[in-house]
Image: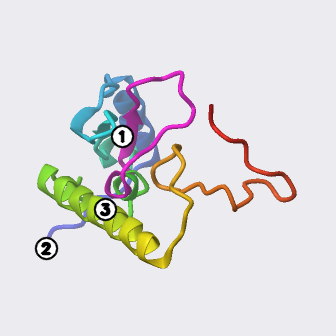
Amino acid sequence: MSQPPTRSLIANIFRNFINSLKPRQIRGTFMGSDYFGNKYYEIPPNPSIGKRKASRWFVPPNKEDFDQEMTAEWEAWLRFRRTEAPTEEELVRNLSIMEMKKKNALEVEKKAGKPTPLLKGMETFPKREEYEVLPGKPQQKPD
């Protein structure tokens, strides 16, 4: 009968030291992009060097712009709410559904007699003149 291998503290320390000297992956694998122009990357987990969770990030098209948008599918992937990156077909399908909902909402407002159109701004959040952005301060009209 063979004995199970024993764990040696010195051997583990030496093995971890050798693994720490090995080059690490710094560049991520390109996972895809969205229709805003963001590019998404991932470095997969590597338990042999103690990295148990993947690293995920995105690179925006304009790095100086702090008011960036991102699709819900890619945000869920970045926050580890989904394991697989969204496919191009899924993004196109959800974009067409979003456009259809916007169109239907404008038609409902026309039928209801609402005179205020959507103001330009972030597409995911409608801005209307009668709503306050900050409490007690009226909304500034675009030039």
**Residue in the image at 12% along x and 55% along y:** 89
Cα–Cα gap, marks 2 and 3: 65 Å
Left or right, 97 with respect to 76, comes to left
Tell me which amino acid carries mark 3: Met
Q: At 61% across and 57% down in the image, what residue appears?
A: 128
Q: Quadrant of residue 39?
A: top left
Is 77 or 25 nearer to us in this picture?
77
Disc 1 or 3, which lies upstream in sequence?
1
Q: Inspect this view and state whether residue 83 appears.
A: no
Q: Which residue in the structure is indicated by mark 2?
A: 1
Q: Residue furthest right?
A: 136
User: The N terminus lies in which quarter of the figure?
Assistant: bottom left
What secondary structure prevails in the magenta region?
Answer: loop
Q: Is residue 55 left or right of residue 84?
A: right
Residue at which label 3 appears:
98
Q: Residue 63: percent from the left, percent from the top? A: 48, 23
Contact check, label 1 and label 2, Cβ < 8 Å: no
Q: In the rendered view, how is the structure colored?
A: rainbow
Q: Which residue range is magenta in the image?
A: 53-74
Separation (CA) of disc 1 from disc 2: 32 Å
Question: In the displayed structure, does residue 129 sit left or right of residue 59?
Answer: right
Identify the residue position indicated by label 1 in the image: 49
Which amino acid does the dot numbered 2 rest on? Met
Residue located 23% across and 53% down the image: 85
Relative horizontal placement of residue 79, taking residue 19 as reference (left or right): right
Which one is earlier in the sequence, the residue at label 2 or at label 3? 2
